[in-house]
Amino acid sequence: GGTMFEELGFHYVGPIDGHNLEHLLPVLKNVRDAPDGPVLIHVVTQKGKGYAPAEAAADRGHAVVKFDVVSGKQTKAKPNAPAYTRVFGESLIKAADADDKVVAITAAMPSGTGVDLFSKAHPDRTFDVGIAEQHAVTFAAGLATEGFKPFCAIYSTFLQRGYDQLVHDVALQNLPVRFALDRAGLVGADGATHAGAFDLAYLCCLPNMTVMAAADEAELVHMVATAHAHDTGPIAFRYPRGEGVGVEMPERGEVLAIGRGRVIQRPEGARVALLSLGTRLAEALKAAERLEAAGIGVTVADARFAKPLDEALILDLAGSHEVLVTLEEGSVGGFGAMVLHLLSSRGALDDGRVRVRTLTLPDSYQDHDTPDRMYAEAGLDAPSIVKVVEAALPVHEASAERSGRLRLA
């Protein structure tokens, strides 16, 4: 089997039984000490060999939480809400039931993306292209040119592999490819390689792109419907690994107005505005509650769109609050950066009336941990948000006349 590699100038060694260390180790030592030229060692292994639970399951044992060694059962908390991945899969089935142009594309991750559910309902409209994200994106672009409505379901971290195709074959041609980005934000046991930290930064810089982030599982249903209806160019929606927050689920998705956020709460005389993109909304609301207990009124808004930004909403929040904090489950250079660009270009920061803080993931790769602990470490949980707000708030003289004047200002 080594002829092809020999022709390419490799020394070919193998095939070797990778489970027989008495054979494998001497080969590795010999090759290590070989004087020259590239060597290809062909090692044959079986997934999970020697551990029945892993051997028996194609998708088990890649990223594991704590588990019972005897049974192989992973200790996962009983979800009190459906997983985002399942919500996406089920919403896409409904879209395809109503529209025979909807197709789903996955790159060797059918169960990880919920496309496995879709393939049961619509096997003839499901395409698994294998570990070939670049092909997945260009294939989706080709389908879009012919009037199909392709949903390209790829983890945020893996779409990086298809970035050139995304830029040249989709965005430049302004083709209506729908990108479903699972595993947006931190992913706990899957670690730094699988964290979806960069998609907001790498998508928002592209002309023609529309970029949404779901704040909860109901919002994800609406975003699938919005992506389905959006036929004038590429659109992406991002959502995290794991379970939703337990909100009531809509019967059917509504098509959202492109580039429009929503205000969740706006008490009279609020001094602080929290503008959240994605699922930090729950933490923003918790932070608001704690600040209100300390007598600080807080407006909470859900941006929904990182591109196009809701300019009217953002300029209004900046113009009517003393502190504006943006929150996102993404790297520096993403949503917060886009908000700052908007505020600076519109002169909203010129008179120094509003103090803006952008909360993002740290500019580093975070090690494995539980998602909750990772977000606390990233400074994106409620206590961290409260600290940032308290540090940023201007100190006022506590006279009634002064606070009255502020409220009118």
Image: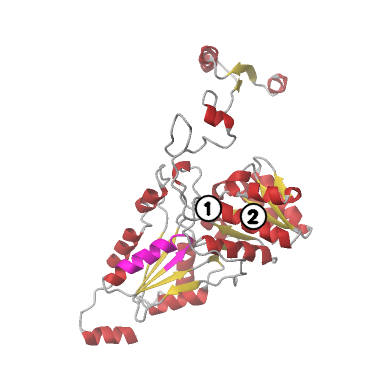
Of residues 166 and 313, the one nearer the viewer is 313
288 inside magenta stretch = yes
Q: Quadrant of the N terminus?
A: top right
> Which residue corresponds to the image point at 72% horizontal and 62% vertical from the top-left?
98
Q: Secondary structure at mark 2?
A: helix
Left or right for 250, reference 67: right
Left or right for 84, reference 292: right
Identified by mark 2, the residue type is Val
Q: Secondary structure at mark 1?
A: loop
Give coordinates of residue 79: x percent, y percent: 47, 51
Left or right for 366, reference 164: left
Highlighted range, magenta: 275-290
Task: Identify the main secondary structure in magenta.
Answer: helix
Give coordinates of residue 334: x percent, y percent: 49, 59
Give the Cα separation between the discs numbered 1 and 2: 30 Å
Q: Quadrant of the C terminus?
A: bottom left
Of residues 241 and 23, the one nearer the viewer is 241
Give coordinates of residue 226: x percent, y percent: 63, 66
Identified by mark 1, the residue type is Ala
Mark on residue 83?
1
Q: Which residue is mark 2?
A: 167
Give coordinates of residue 344: x percent, y percent: 45, 71
Q: Please, is residue 138 above or below residue 338 in the view?
A: above
Q: Where on the picture, by quarter, is residue 400? A: bottom left
**How is colour applied across the structure in the image?**
secondary structure
